[in-house]
Image: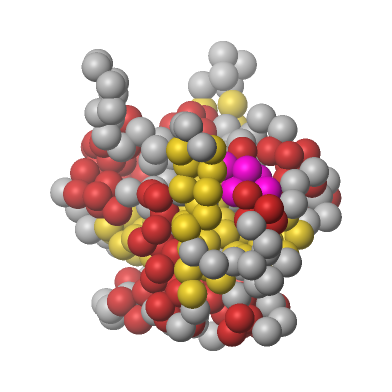
Amino acid sequence: MRGIKVFSGSSHPTLTGLVCDKLGIQPSEVVTKKFANMETNVEIRESVRGEDVYIIQTGEGRVNDNMMELLIMISACKTASAARVTAVIPCYPYARQCKKDASRAPISAKLVANMLSAAGADHIITMDLHASQIQGFFDIPVDNLFAEPTQIQWITENVPNWRDVVMVSPDAGGTKRVTSIADRLKLDFAIVHRERKTGNTVIGDVEGKVAVLVDDMGFTCKTICQAATVLKDAGATEVLAILSHGIFCEEAIERLNNSNLSTVVVTNSIPQEVNMSESNVLKGIDISAVLSEAIRRTHNGESVSYLFDHVPY
């Protein structure tokens, strides 16, 4: 592909390599390092004048360092006369801080949007935003891709007798996400409802069936582990979980290993190599094909809406 440069931040070079392999190009050369006082320094080692630049940097891990590095890379490319700079952020940082839910609470997701725009980003590509309204925080184009097509493909290819599966939301907030998959696969769905007085209950029939929990983010994983226990008590023969972003903190991996979940499927929007080495239940879905096709279509001025319902090959 001509006129395109794809740079990798330090957060997920493996994903950048997979994306570039599918685009048939090499990752562009950039050096990121820390000064003695822990300031971030970025050196763009290739000319970007008049080029269409894509910077892949996911938002978890060392969140603040990764964010600052991305902002500096965007600014460096704009200063070097890049024609367009697109930030590809598979997992958007501070996404859960998207509303004012208490007195004097910050809306940090909006602040992140402001910083990206101020740094010079012309376009944002991300995946499965915690709240789709975050797109409205920007005054520049935002493409919010979905992991759903790849998740559906995994279910149909890896779950025996998948037509008898029940899709389950671990809480009321994820109902829309679960019903979308259930409708497309023509499956039943259920909800784990949390009540203070009676505890968690299942709304729907899961007895004698395989239950698949679906959520966008896995932090401590307490919610899905508790939901798995409730589903097993309600008669589910097996419980699986599918997550878009596996952030996994506060002993989450140990909690998953000791839970009633037989399999936990997560995308590689965040590096998972270490987590997978520590867990027998964790499985991966590669989203590099979705990101690479989004980059290709954006570069060529094509619509990306095809990717909302299909997995590119």
Determine the residue positioned at 60% across, 75% down. 165
Determine the residue positioned at 56% across, 71% down. 166
Determine the residue positioned at 61% across, 81% down. 164
Q: Looking at the rendering, which quadrant does residue 304 occupy? A: bottom left
146 versus 159 height, above or below: above
Q: Quarter holding the N terminus? A: bottom left
Does the magenta stretch mainly form a helix, a strand or a loop? helix
Determine the residue positioned at 57% across, 19% down. 38
Q: Is residue 311 left or right of residue 33?
A: left
152 versus 244 height, above or below: below
Q: Is residue 175 left or right of residue 141?
A: right
What segment carries the magenta color?
A: 223-229
On the question of residue 41 being in view, the answer is: no
Residue 293, given in percent of the width and then of the height, sits at: 45, 76
Residue 198, given in percent of the width and then of the height, sits at: 51, 37
146 versus 302 height, above or below: above
Q: Is residue 163 left or right of residue 59?
A: right
Residue 132, given in percent of the width and then of the height, sits at: 29, 53
On the question of residue 134 being in view, the answer is: yes
Residue sitting nearer the eye, 43 or 172? 172
Residue sitting nearer the eye, 30 or 191? 191
